[in-house]
Amino acid sequence: MKLIMSAATLAALLHITPVVVLVKRPDAVRTLLPGADAFTAREVHLSDADAHRLHEAVDWSPEDGVLTFYTGSAGSTAVGGLVFVRVDTPHGPLEVAVGFTPQGTVRGAIVTKATVEMKPWVLEAVGAGLGDPYRGLKPGAAPDAATAIASRAGNLAVYVAREVDKGVARALASYGAFYDHVRT
């Protein structure tokens, strides 16, 4: 006898709930690239060696081996860069937008997507100051917002912060290694 499962049944068994948008991408871009009036998306197609190097550094490789960086400018002045990073968790995916200043430090990080199940945890983490510890980090730094918010948030919010830390670490590694390939 063959067992046929619907997508909903499979999702229930895997404990993954639907993904919701917490912050629309255009709003995240405006927040993380303030003052920009022109935007460019540039792709970096990673070689197998580059993808392996990134995987070794942060246990992650982008989908299809392609990193997409968004750059913003105001007239001829660079405002910064931004990358969206997906973090797969046992409770479903998170998407984190990480913005960088023209000097290469983190301007901010915003959770743009989460599952319905994780949404309250994300909101609690954000309320506890999740984004604050990332500001000013440079490529090579180890993000640790989870420790920073632990005294102000519950265990599930701290769990989310650890997952967001992974996303910010991936963005830092990607930006540090590959952003120069897209600058004009």
Image (spheres, grey):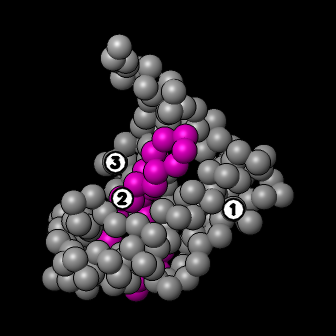
Front residue (pair 176, 12): 12
The answer to whether residue 72 is visible is no
Which residue is at a point 50% across and 85% down the rendered structure image?
140
Residue denoted by label 2: 84
- Residue 18 lies, with reference to residue 143, above or below; the image says above
Q: Amino acid at mark 2?
A: Phe
The residues bearing labels 2 and 3 have C-alpha atoms spaced at a distance of 9 Å
Q: Amino acid at mark 1?
A: Ala
Q: Secondary structure at mark 1?
A: helix
Q: Are marks 2 and 3 in contact (CB under 8 Å)?
A: yes
Which residue is at a point 22% across and 77% down the rendered structure image?
48
Q: Residue furthest front?
A: 1
Q: Is residue 142 left or right of residue 59?
A: right
The answer to whether residue 156 is visible is yes
- Residue 142 lies, with reference to residue 24, above or below; the image says below
Q: Is residue 95 magenta?
A: yes
The residues bearing labels 1 and 2 have C-alpha atoms spaced at a distance of 20 Å
Residue denoted by label 3: 25
The residues bearing labels 3 and 1 have C-alpha atoms spaced at a distance of 24 Å
Q: Position of residue 11 (x, y in %)?
A: 45, 27
- Residue 20 lies, with reference to residue 61, above or below; the image says above
Q: Is residue 93 magenta?
A: yes
Earlier residue among tags 3 and 1? 3
Earlier residue among tags 1 and 2? 2
Q: Amino acid at mark 3?
A: Arg
Q: Position of residue 131 (x, y in %)?
A: 59, 60
* Stretch of the chain drawn in magenta: 78-106
Q: Position of residue 12 (x, y in %)?
A: 50, 24
Q: Secondary structure at mark 2?
A: strand
Residue denoted by label 1: 146
Between disc 2 and disc 3, the foreground one is 2
Q: Is residue 159 left or right of residue 72?
A: right
